[in-house]
Structures are given as C-alpha cells and as structure tokens.
Amino acid sequence: MKLKIFLVLFLVSILSVESFSQKVDPFILMLEFGGAATLASLNGEYALIQKERYQVNARVGGLTLFQKKEEDLRNLMAGANIIFNIQKSHHLEAGSGLSYSYNFSSISDYKVTIREEAISFCPSIGYRYDDLVNGLVFRFAWTPSFPVYDFVNTQSVDLKYREAGADVSTSKPYSLDLPYAVTRIGYFGISMGFRF
C-alpha cells in the first residue's frame, strides 16, 4: 500500500515539474560546508512543485570531501525543503531529511580503530539567495541533528571500553565501536552552487 501511495505522489510530482519547467531551472548542484554532512559535501536539489508563493525541492547528497588519510567518513543525506517568497531573489527556507553517518578512523598512537554509525533526523531553517533561473545559489542554514537509530550497541561499547584499558597499557591493537547517535544542536551549513 505504501509503495502505491509513493508511486502516485511521485507521478504527481513529475507532472508538476513538467508544468513549470519553462519558468525555472529545476536542478541545483551545491558544495556545502558544515550542515548535515558535518564537513564538506556535494549535494543536489531538484524542484518538484512550484506554486505562486513557494517551491518544494527534493534534496540528496553526501559525497564527503576533505577527509583525513586515516579516516573513512561517509555521510549520505536525503530530504526535502520549501523555499518561500519565490517572486524575489531572497528566500526563507525550511526543510527536513535523514542523514546516514559512518566514520571509521584509526588512532595510530594508541593502535585503536573506531567505528561510528547512525541515522539522524536533520531539520533545517535558513536564508537562501536564488533567482530560480540559471545562476548562482547561496544558502546559510541551521541544521541540527537528532538521532533516530544508532547501529552501535552502547552496552557492548562499555564492555569493550573497559577491556580496552588493559590493551592500551600493553600496546595491543584493538577495535572500539562508539555510539555516534548524539543530538547536535549547533550545526550550521553554508552552501554555494549553481542552478541549471
């Protein structure tokens, strides 16, 4: 049943896009610093619905850039946002989405490897400069992160952490899974991109 509802909504969205594709350029490619991806990521948006006073965009991204050599950091994000006041270039923007975060890093001084993995709910609210036609897009948004699911069992973390204490003193390599799903209120993101 859910699949049928999704397919109907998807078809309606496609028809909506076709009805206004001559008025705006629907695709945006942005480089984001901070935000839901934490560091820097490459994100894309596509206009799904446009009404007289607002526009609804689907958003995906998360190609995490600028990683350290000893890290394997992945962050995938999907969501939607609404841009208000579309008759002008300055907009209020609000949105929500889910972010999957995976971080595998090693601390060579202590011979430790750490894995963090979680899914978080990431709402956003902010400012956007966007002419809605071919050109530059700039956005600044507050993007807190609220845990939905943590892949790491915190009880096993406590046990491994206590056991690891002895291993550190003997310099024996060990792995440690840390709970990543913590609420992060102070996340802000700056994005620059191009609409085409």
Image (spheres, rainbow, N blue to C red):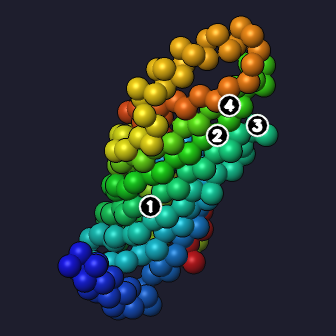
Q: Residue 1 carries which label?
A: none
Q: Which of 43 and 105 is in front in this view?
A: 105
Q: Name the residue under label 4.
A: 113
Q: What's the residue at 57%, 16% (across, down)? A: 163
- State which tag comes first along the sequence, 1 or 2: 1
In terms of sequence position, does the residue under pointer 3 or pointer 4 come before the other? 3
Asked if the residues shown at circle 1 and circle 2 are in contact, with their CB atoms under 8 angstroms apart, the answer is no
The residues tagged by marks 4 and 2 sit, at their Cα atoms, a distance apart of: 7 Å
Query: Type of residue at label 3?
Result: Glu
Q: Residues within 10 Å of mark 4 (few under 14, many from 20)?
A: some
SS of the residue under disc 4: strand
Q: What residue type is labelled 2?
A: Phe
Q: In which quarter of the image is residue 150?
A: top left
Q: Which of disc 2 and disc 4 is earlier in sequence?
A: 2
Inspect the image, locate mark 1, and give the three-letter code of the amino acid beneath it: Ala
Disc tally is 4
* Distance (Cα) linking label 4 and label 1: 28 Å
Q: Is residue 140 visible?
A: no
Q: Name the residue under label 3.
A: 70
Q: Mark 1 points at which residue?
A: 78
Q: Can you tell which of label 3 and label 4 is closer to the viewer?
A: 4
Residue drawn at x 64%, y 40% as measured from the top left: 104
